[in-house]
Each structure stands twice: as structure tokens, then as C-alpha cells.
Amino acid sequence: MPPSMRALVAGEVGEPGDVLRLESRPVPTPEAGQALIRVRATPIHASDLHVLRGRYGFSPEFPVVGGHMECVGRVEALGPDTEGPAVGERVVVAAVPAVPGPAVAGTWQEYLVADTRRLLAVPDGLSDSSACQLAVNPLTALLLVTRELDVQPGEWLLQTAAGSTVGRLVIQLSRHLGIRTINVVRRRDAVEEIKALGGDEVICTEDEDLVRRVAEIAGPAGVRKAVDCVAGPVGAQVSQALAPGGEVVVYGALSTHRQTDPAALTIPLAARSVIYETKAVRGFWLNRWFGTAAPEEALRALAQVRDLVAEGVLSIPQGRPFPLDRFAEAVAVAEAPARGTKPLFVLDGD
């Protein structure tokens, strides 16, 4: 075991490209209930960058190792009197910080310690690129469809940001479960792509009225279940398109990602519609779910996601690999409007 390792560290809150530095740190030692993981691959999520900017739902203590979501690696050692995956086993680390809950190690480093209850073994047939992306987007899609909304076969599910990573996974999962989807996109050139992916109906807000089109597709009563990742006026239109008693789960706010004024981070709901038609608008945040779910429940859900990906039901696009020392380029790719594939830090190969 080497005495030191490389870690990508932010010394203070700020723009990732300005505050991140590649540093040498001691290799950590696992305590009871923990495992030492040699990281193989870890993604760069938008949420990782927002954490560093101080614009996410939790704020770590700085300086902090970047990467606050997930990675794949191999177990190097177990803490004293600790049961867990065998040394050498390849595992996913669900490093999503639970809110409320204890701090977790950042994933943008060569070694990290993790609670063994946050580790899930992955089969050799699953690539590092897919495995290191299991614990955030596919898990979010599964929880939204099957647990938060309990959408049944034959029901309509309305979703915004259908072209996003989670949106595409929702389409794939819904098709597998026999759920019909109404998918909202911003650009006309995305319509055929979403249909080819398996979306039943597609609404383009560039030239179509969302509320009117939902009524045409699902009937004048509207739909009873929806997920929204845009917020703002689009989120309000989704609420308006709901049937009386319907509910929308808001899990993101893409319309505000460059917005720094907290007063602008809104969904302008129609009060009469919410009151007299008893519609429900509520939030979902994976971090808070990890803070309330029992560790066994979280691992069961993650195992379900792993199996769906391994069976080909859910498809995770191949990531674009970067070494740690090219972090500035990797962050720039993550920020690009049409980046295509998600950048990954790849730290260790076979």
C-alpha cells in the first residue's frame, strides 16, 4: 500500500476551475465498519460542481476532496472486526451524502474509506463506466417511477427534460414496466430522438402548448402523475396539466442552473388550481432519501438498478475518460451545453 495518493481538492468555495488543485495526501486507514477502496472510475456530475460553488443542498467543510456522489473501485482492506465485501472485490460506492447524516469521503481521489453498508458488488460484465454511474441517475429514475409515484402499467407519466440522463432512463424503465410516457423537450430536433428511444408521446415547448397538448393526449382531465426537472414556468405548466388530485414530483431545476438570485428559483403555481383541484407538488432529493432510507433498503434499490443495467433494460452511455491531472479540461467538458457523454475521472485500470 503506498503511503500517499493523489486527490483533487477544493480549498474554498468557488468556480471549480479556479479552486481545484491536485494534491498529495496520506492514504486513509479504514476504521470499524469501513472499507478502504482503490478508486477506478468516478463521474463528474453537475451537482458535484454546484457543491464546490456553494449552490447545492448541502455544504461540506472546506478544504474538501471533490466528487460527492459515486464511484467504482476495488476493496483494498477492511477495518478491524468488519464484515463486508472480500478484499479485491469490485464494488460501487454510493457516496451520496445523506441529509441528515454523517460526512462521506469525496470520490475524486485514488483511495477512499467508505461505510461497508454503502458498497454494492458489481459483476465483471458491467464496465467501470456503467458501474460508476449506477448510484445517482439510474437510482433516481427507479425511485421516481416506482416508489415516489408508484406508476402502474398502462398509466400515463408526464415528464420534463426528457432528453436528460434521468429522462432517458425514465423512458427506458417505463417501457419495461408498461407505463406510457408523455415527454417534454425544448427543441424540435429532439422529438424524433425521444420517440426512437421509446417515448410514447413528445411535446416540444419550442412550438407547442404543453397544457393543451397533454389534454389532447391524455384527455381533458389531464394526467395524474408527473416528474419535473426544470421548475420555473415549465414546472408551473406541468402542475396546470395535472388532473384533479394529481401530483408532480420536482427533482431538479434546470431552468435555474445559472441563476444566482435565490428569489428567482421558483415555480409560479396557480393557487386556484392547487387549492380547488387539490393537486400536490412535492420535491425529491436523492440525498434526503439516503438520509431517511434504512441502509438495507438503499442497497436493495441499488441492487435492483444494477440488475436492470446488467440485463440491458437500462442503458448508461459510455463516459469520456480523463486522468485526474486533466481536471480543468474534464470540468470544461462537464459544463459544455452539448457535451454528449459524461466525463469520468479514470484512476486505475486492470
Image (cartoon, rainbow, N blue to C red):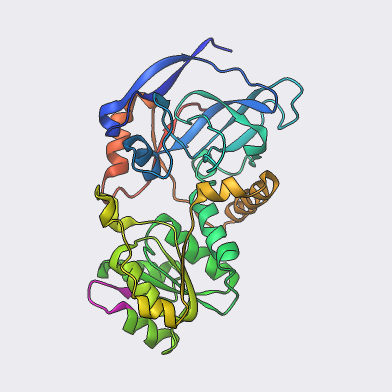
In the drawing, does residue 201 fall left or right of residue 187? right
Residue in view at x 24 percent, y 50 percent = 261
Q: Which secondary structure dominates the residues rendered in magenta? A: loop
- In the image, 137: left or right of 215? right
Rendered position, 164 above or below 106: below
Residue nearest the viewer, comparing 194 with 12: 12
Q: Write down the region rendered in magenta.
A: 203-210
Q: Nearer the viewer, residue 100 or 220?
A: 100
Locate residue 47, reporting x and y percent: 39, 44
244 relative to 89, above or below: below
- Is any atom of residue 125 visible in this view? yes
Name the foreground residue: 253 vs 168: 253
Residue reaching furthest bottom? Answer: 220
Residue 240 found in image quarter: bottom left
Horizontally, residue 43 falls left or right of residue 28, namely left
Q: Quadrant of the C terminus?
A: top right
- Quadrant of the rendered structure where residue 146 is? bottom right
Identify the image quadrant of residue 319.
top left
Q: Position of residue 160 (x, y in %)?
A: 38, 66
Query: On screen, 170 above or below 34?
Result: below
Residue 119 showing in the rendered view: no
Front-most of residues 62 and 129: 62
Asked whether 207 falls inside the magenta stretch, the response is yes
Does residue 243 sit above or below 66 in this rendering?
A: below
Report if residue 14 lies within the magenta region: no
Q: Residue at x 64, y 54 (%)?
A: 304
Question: Furthest residue to the top?
Answer: 3
Q: Tell me where residue 170 appears, x and y as whole percent.
A: 49, 63
Name which residue lies at 33% across and 80% down. 211
Q: Position of residue 263 (x, y in %)?
A: 27, 55
